[in-house]
Each structure stands twice: as structure tokens, then as C-alpha cells.
Amino acid sequence: MASLWGTVVLLCGVVALSGAQQKKSNVPRLKLSYKEMLESNNLVTFEGQVNSSAYHTFLLDEEKGRLVVGAKDHIFSFNLVNISRDMAQIPWPASTSRRDECKWAGKDLMDSVFRLESQIENGRGKSPYDPKLLTASILIDGELYSGTSADFMGRDFAIFRTLGQHHPIRTEQHDSRWLNDPRFVSVHLIPESDNQEDDKIYLFFRENAMDGEHAGKATQARIGQLCKNDFGGHRSLVNKWTTFLKARLVCSVPGLNGIDTHFDELQDVFLMSSKDPKNPIIYAVFTTSSNIFKGSAVCLYSMADIRRVFLGPYAHRDGPNYQWVPFQGRVPYPRPGTCPSKTFGGFDSTKDLPDDVITFARGHPAMFNPVYPINNRPIIVKTDTDYQFTQIVVDRVEAEDGQYDVMFIGTDMGTVLKVVSIPRGSWHDLEEILLEEMTVFREQAAITVMKLSTKQQQLYLGSEMGVSQMPLHRCEVYGKACAECCLARDPYCAWDGTECSRYFPMAKRRTRRQDIRNGDPLTQCSDLQHQDNLNGQPTVLDKTVYGVENSSTFLECSAKSQRALTYWQYQQANDDRRRDIKTEDRFVCTEQGLLIRTLDKKDSGMYVCQAVEHGFMQTLLKVTLEVIDTERLDDLIHRDDEDAAHTATTHTTARDTPTARESPNQKLWYRDFLSLVNHPTLNSVDEFCEQVWKRERKQRRQKANLSQQVQLHQLHQQQQQQGLVHAHTHVHAHGLAAKWKHLQERQKGRNRRTHELERAPRSV
């Protein structure tokens, strides 16, 4: 009956914790500091050079195993296996004449000259004059597509195509309908069909809202498209894009009364390739420009939705207020934005397009409908945090129960969030699990670039200060038990029967335990509970602590996982029933442990610290608390002083046969305990410990001196006896003299060793 009662209490405790666990669902399960990452060999860093900075441009070469990094005045080449090995660098400072030009223009010193192989190219239309401006580019078939500024002042932003054999081409100049003070994020080539003539370049950027599009000045995220085989018009839009279109990317949280919380500051984009190269999944990172709150979000988009918007109505300004409305008139043929190919229309070149198509394209570059994310809401939202999202890369991982997308999200605080996306039936029903938060730079610096190597299973990160490298998985940090490995819900990791290790889909091991979708250790590890604790459950720590009546004590216990909730149960001696401990006047339950403000004699007993995570309960710690009453305390302190003196005087005669009082396990430091709990002057435990160590060293010196005096006394008695023998036996005089000299030398050696031990530092 007693065990049944205990089970009822246990279940009630779990129900009471359900609300609190929901509050913890948005925190990382593990949080690792920079020091912890280094000590666990999970981080390699290059902390930059004194004469360089801005490590923002990465080129990952998987075949050669190198990471090429562009920075201020330097190009670096790192080993992908370990960036701290065989690093190479090329100094690339700006010329004196270029530096003077920048000074005259009021700019920071920089270089706007492109060097490809042995050629020197003018940097205009390829890179910005100001390195702080956000630009993006991609090199395709020897041609450079870039979104950048073309002037010193950073006002003439455009989308360029340069290099190659064709004439340079750009967007319409000084037309806010095309581009309105944009900041480019990334550029990608995405096929439209099996015909390469239909290939399109997609650009992701943010810009100011167009006139009349939004009340006041607001930032909007955009996706732009243009055809790879666009060579401009014949009589109009000469050397200008004729297929450029743009649409708004919406990432918002639906709110009450139709008022949404918008995240419009697009920061980064990652394309997750699929079996069909025409339909990658697009991950986009946003922040908010709101002055009311600080927040970040990740939204997921499909190419089907994007193409649907570009095939929809064009934005048109009309009406008495000249507002933006969907265009209702006749759209010329072929539809503006369509690539010239045999697939659509049969036109061989954009120079052959009719004049009405070119005219319409010039006046209608924007689409009316926005692109909404999958499920019409973000998959991750973080608000009121100390950091904001800056970068994202995604790895598709094969697990025991399917494929999962693992996101690595960089922040402006130099941390990386590891998040797994778990589909609940379809892409329209996702659960996001925040696995880890890791600090990857010694000093706080925004992560400005991230590259992922699936071959090396490594992640490379850049900032203003340097470059860091970390593995995609650290299975060993989750714990040494099957239950802990299962609760981690990391697709990279599985319990292999011995430890939490890397999961390989092709490995033929029946002992692999992994449950990413549900994270249920009861179904995965229940059959291991009869085995050794390291296999089934984590080893439970048992310890005994002492407290003093009417004082306070703290029982420390915290779960390794930040997602777990801890709670305490109490069991008195000779009683097999446990009762829950709830926060009240004398008891305070915290995430670090249990505080008992005023100890009572009846508080003696066993305290059990348990953790609940994802419906699974495990015992972390069992503490036996013995409360000493104040009357017994005085006797124990007095006895402790007597024991110290008695031990010192009998150290040499009874060293090998200690009495019950001299047992090291029975030495009780109640005076020290009282000083630690209620000391009027000490401000920290460190100061207290320093005093205890000084007192210990003093007692050791006193005991050593007393022992030395006893030894000298015994030696003196031996010398007197030897002197009597010498007086009656003259034949052995020479031998006794030698023995006397030997004893003196031996005593000197003992004194020297004792002196050295006293001077040597003691470790405690």
C-alpha cells in the first residue's frame, strides 16, 4: 500500500510541473560556454591578426580540403580538417594611389580592384567601395552576378552582370520602383525547367518600401528574379535587365484582430537542395526593425509558392490616391519575366522581345502578391532575447525514423544555436527542438558568415575578429546513459549499447536506440534497466551532509539539461513513504537546488532530487541530511579540539592503530560549517576556505614540531644508553663513535626533510 501511495504522489508531481515545462520548451537543452567548448575539444579558433580584420568572405573547396577566407588586406587558406594546421596567407594591401583616392573621398582605406589570376579588373559593379555595405555575388560560367553599389557614396545600388564575353548589364538607374536603397543578402541559380535556357538567378535582399506601399519609412524583405540569358533590350532597356521582377517575402506571426508581428529585416538565406534541383527548400533568417521589442525568426519557403507569386498580378499604381493595386489590364505576350527560349514563346533573345513587353517590364518590376512562408508562420521565433539571428546553414540528416533538417543559426553575440526541425506528419506541421547553444568566439562578435562541410562534418564560422571551426555533432556531451542519449533527440546521435555515439544509417547494429520524433526513453531504454546503471539509467549520486539546528543549508542539484525540471521528495528514517517538497516559508526550490532556510531536528532524513523531461523521470541525487542540535554541537566542537591534541601527542606511538576517535571518517568540522553558514564578516566561500587551509597548515606545523621533539627525546635516551655501554666496553669505542655520527647525520636528514615539507605548498 505504501508503494502505491508513493506512485500517486509521483504522478501528481508530474502533472503540477507540466505548465512549468511548457515555459522551458523554448530554451536550449544544453548551453556550452566558450571555455567548455575548448576544454571538450569541440572548437578550433583562429583569432585573427593584428593587421587584419573582417573575416567575412568564405570559399569552401571540398575537393582540395581548403577553406579560403577573404579579409582586410589578406587572403587566408585553412585546412578543412583543422584550421589551426598549415595555414597559408597572401598579403593583399591596397596600393598607395588607391588609398589616397579613398582618403580624398572621405572613405576608410580599402581596395576596389579585383584580381583574378594574373589579370587586373576594375572593381566597379563587382564589389562595393565601402566594405560595411551588404553585397552578394555569384560566379556562373565565368560571369559575375552581383548586387552592390557602383559609386563612392553608396547611393547607386544595382544588380550587375560583369566579366565574361558579353557586355555588362544592370538594373534601371535612379528608379525606386526597381531598387530602393537595397541591402543584398545572397544570390542563387535555380533551374526553372529541364531546359538550361530557362535558368533563373534569384536574389534575396531587403530595401525601403516603395512610395505609397507602406505608411512611413519601413524595411521590406524581397526576392528578385532575372533570366540567365537576359542580354537587355534592343531599342529600350539597352544593357538593362528586361526580365527583372521582385516580390515581397513575408515572415510574420498572426496576431489578434488581424494585426501581425512582422519580421522584415532579412539577414540570411540558405537553400536546402532536394532530389529535384528545381525545388529547393528555402530557409530565411529575419529580425525586426521594431522599436518596441527585439526579436528574430526563421521562415521556410517553397519554390512552388514563389513561382506562383511571379505568375500572379503585377503591382500597379492607380486611383485617386495613387496607391498600389493589382494590374487588371492586358498583359503583353510573352509575359514579362519569361526567359527567351523554345519552351516559352520561341524568342531566341531578349533583344527580339516586342516593344510593349519591354515597356511594360520597365514600369512594372514588382509583383502585387507577397510570398508567404510554409504554414503561414515562422518555424522559429525568438523575442526579448539578448541576441538576434544573423546567419543560418542547414544539414539534412538521416536518422533511424526518417530524415531531419538540423539548423545551425549564428547570432550577433557570437553564439550558435543547433535546432532540429521535426515534421508532425507534413511540412505544414513542424516542431522545432532547440538542442544546443554554443559560444564559438572568445570575445563577443557577430557571426557574419557560416559554411558547412558535409564531407568533414564540420561547421566554419567567420566574424570581425577571426574564424572558428566546430563539429556538427558532439554525442558524448549528452551523457553516459541510454535515457540521456534518447532525450537529446539529436539525429546525429544514437545509443549503440555502450555509449552515445555517431549514428550511421548503414551500420548493422541491433542495439542502436534513437527516437528523434518522440524522444521517449521509456520505449527505447526500458529493457536496459536491469543491466548496469551506465547502460540503462544514469548513476545516482548518494552523499551525506550535515546541518546545524536553526541554521540554513543548501542541497545542490541541477539537471544537465536546461529543458528538465527538478523537484524534491523527502523521506524520514524508518519510513518507506516519500512526500513532495513544495516552496513555502522554510523551503525554497530553485533550478540549482533546495534551500532550507531554518533547519529543524525533524528535517533529518533522505532528500531525493528528481528531474522530469519530456515525460520521463529520473533520479539525479540522494542526499542524507543529518541535523545536529545546538547542545550536541558544543560537545562535538569541544571533543574535536581534544581529539586534535590527543592525536598530536599519540601520533608516533599509536600511528598504526587508530582509535575510534581518530578515524578520518569521523572528523566533524562543525565549527567550519557554522562559520560558513552564519559568518558575520566573510563575504565569500573562497575567503572562508582560505582561512580553513591556513588553520590546517598551522596545525600540521604544530604536529610536526611536537613529533620532532618526541623523536629527539627518544634519541637522547638512546644516546645515554649507548654512552653507558661505551663507558664499560672500551673495546667497541671506535664502532660506537661511528654509530653516533651516523645517528647525527640521520637526524639532520630528518630535520631537513621536515623543513622542506613545511615550506612546500599544500594541496587541498
Image: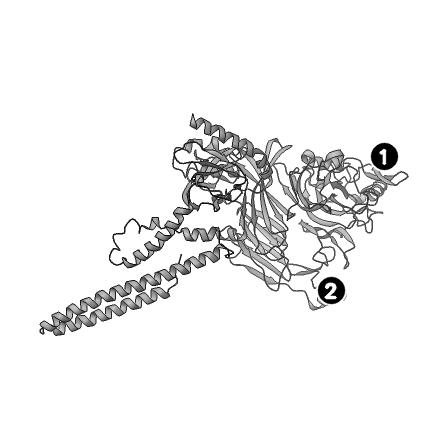
Task: Please say whether residue 24 is visible from this viewpoint.
Answer: yes
The residue under label 1 is which amino acid type?
Arg
Q: Farthest top residue?
A: 1
User: In the image, is residue 203 above or below residue 735?
Assistant: above
Q: Residue at x 33, y 51 (%)?
A: 664
| Residue 119 place in picture, x, y as percent | 67, 60
Quadrant into which the N terminus falls: top left
**Residue 208 at what x, y percent from top left?**
78, 47
Q: Mark 2 highlights which residue?
A: 102
**Three-letter code, disc 2:** Cys
Examine the rendering and report whether any part of residue 81 can be seen.
no
User: In front: 304, or 528?
Assistant: 528
Quick check: marks 2 and 1 in contact, CB under 8 Å?
no
Query: Element under label 1?
Result: loop
What is the image's colouring? one colour
Q: Is residue 347 left or right of residue 300?
A: right
Which dot marks residue 571? none
Image quarter of residue 424:
top right
* Depth order, front residue of 621/339: 621
Q: Is residue 685 left or right of residue 633?
A: right
Is the C terminus in the top left, top right, bottom left or bottom right quadrant? Answer: bottom left
In the current view of this chain or complex, which residue is farthest to the front? 631
Q: Is disc 2 surrounded by few (<14), some (14 to 19) or many (20+) residues within 10 Å?
A: some
Residue 762 figure quarter: bottom left
x then y, percent, for residue 722: 15, 69
Instruction: List the residue tagged with mark 1.
Output: 330
Q: CA distance from mark 2 to mark 1?
A: 50 Å
